[in-house]
Image (tube, rainbow, N blue to C red):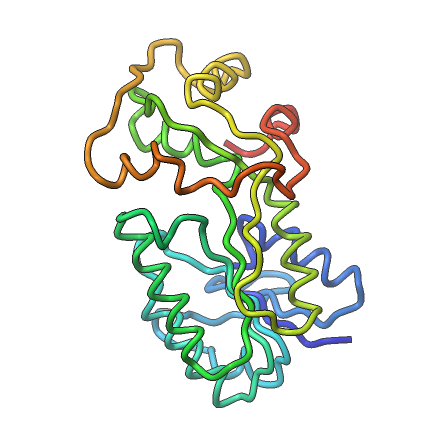
């Protein structure tokens, strides 16, 4: 049995990861800012409760993100983990953070560098976007616009969780091979599938987004390539009725 702390444990791949690790008999601390059954309460931004959450943990799986800037929170976690003698830190990053000039991606890359320099044995896994990403983009655009001319390689959170479980219970491996979904889809095809599932309006304007960031996306720098290691297809994800 290994004592494993998981940040970001209550959303995305954190939920199935905690379930997998607990089913395998590990002592898992599911860290969250909000109290709840089976949770360890701590705040990466303020540091409140962090020392207690990390104390005695052998492995930390760092999934928490505010989707804007995570570097400072990660530095706080690294300092705490270093003092506590954590033996392995596993970090989930994003494919393309080193090639796409998006501010959030630049922060992810800087976070990877901070982890590599911290002196704690580590493993970094970069994954492609989750299946929910196209729908999230559509929602952020108010249901009116969708990118044209982009390809996506969506991956299931269960597939990401399965790989993270392997890494968390193995030896530190540095940066490992990228994880991508089993198919690469054109954005127009994704929009068609969302509409067929009743999860996108009929009147959506496909737009070619300008700038260096979207040029890098159009070049495919966010793709892991095929065959991807993920198993769940986009249609299979839609069929589950996953939360919108």
Q: Quadrant of residue 22?
A: bottom right
Name the residue located 53 percent from the left edge and 88 percent from the top edge: 84
- Measuring from the top left, give residue 187's x and y in whole percent: 42, 23
Q: Position of residue 77 (x, y in %)?
A: 44, 76
96 relative to 243 in the view: left or right: left
Q: Is residue 92 above or below residue 130?
A: below
In what quadrant of the picture does the N terminus appear? Answer: bottom right
How many numbered marks have been drawn onto this rendered protein structure?
A: 0
- Image: 201 above or below 84: above
The structure residue drawn at horizontal position 68% and vertical position 76%, both measured from the top left corner, is 3
Residue name at image x 30 percent, y 56 percent: 106
Q: Going by the picture, which residue comes out furthest to the left?
A: 211
Q: Is residue 84 above or below residue 27?
A: below
Residue 109 on image: x %, y %: 36, 61
**Residue plotted at (45% across, 22% down):** 186
- 53 sits to left or right of 96: right
In this rendering, the answer to whether 82 lies above or below 155 is below
Instruction: Give coordinates of residue 39: x percent, y percent.
Output: 59, 65
Q: Give residue 20's quadrant in the image.
A: bottom right
């Amino acid at each position: 049995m290994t004592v494993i702390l998981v940040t970001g444990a209550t959303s995305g791949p954190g939920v199935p990861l905690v379930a997998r690790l607990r089913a395998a008999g590990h002592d898992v601390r599911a860290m969250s800012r909000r109290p709840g059954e089976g949770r360890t309460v701590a705040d990466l931004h303020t540091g409140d409760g962090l020392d207690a959450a990390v104390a005695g943990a052998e492995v930390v799986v760092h999934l928490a993100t505010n989707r804007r800037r995570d570097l400072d929170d990660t530095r706080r976690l690294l300092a705490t983990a270093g003092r506590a003698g954590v033996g392995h830190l596993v970090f989930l990053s994003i494919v393309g953070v080193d090639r796409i000039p998006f501010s959030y991606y630049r922060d992810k890359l800087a976070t990877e560098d901070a982890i590599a320099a911290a002196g704690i044995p580590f493993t970094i896994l970069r994954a492609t976007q989750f299946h929910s990403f196209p729908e999230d983009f559509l929602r952020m655009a108010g249901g009116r616009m969708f990118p044209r001319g982009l390809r996506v390689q969506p991956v299931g959170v269960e597939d990401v969780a399965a790989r993270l479980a392997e890494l968390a219970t193995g030896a530190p491996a540095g940066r490992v091979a990228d994880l991508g979904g089993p198919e690469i889809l054109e954005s127009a095809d994704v929009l068609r599938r969302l509409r067929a599932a009743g999860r996108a309006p009929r009147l959506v304007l496909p737009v070619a987004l300008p700038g260096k960031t979207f040029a890098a996306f159009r070049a495919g720098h966010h793709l892991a390539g095929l065959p991807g290691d993920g198993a769940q297809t986009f249609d299979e994800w839609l069929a589950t009725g996953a939360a919108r």
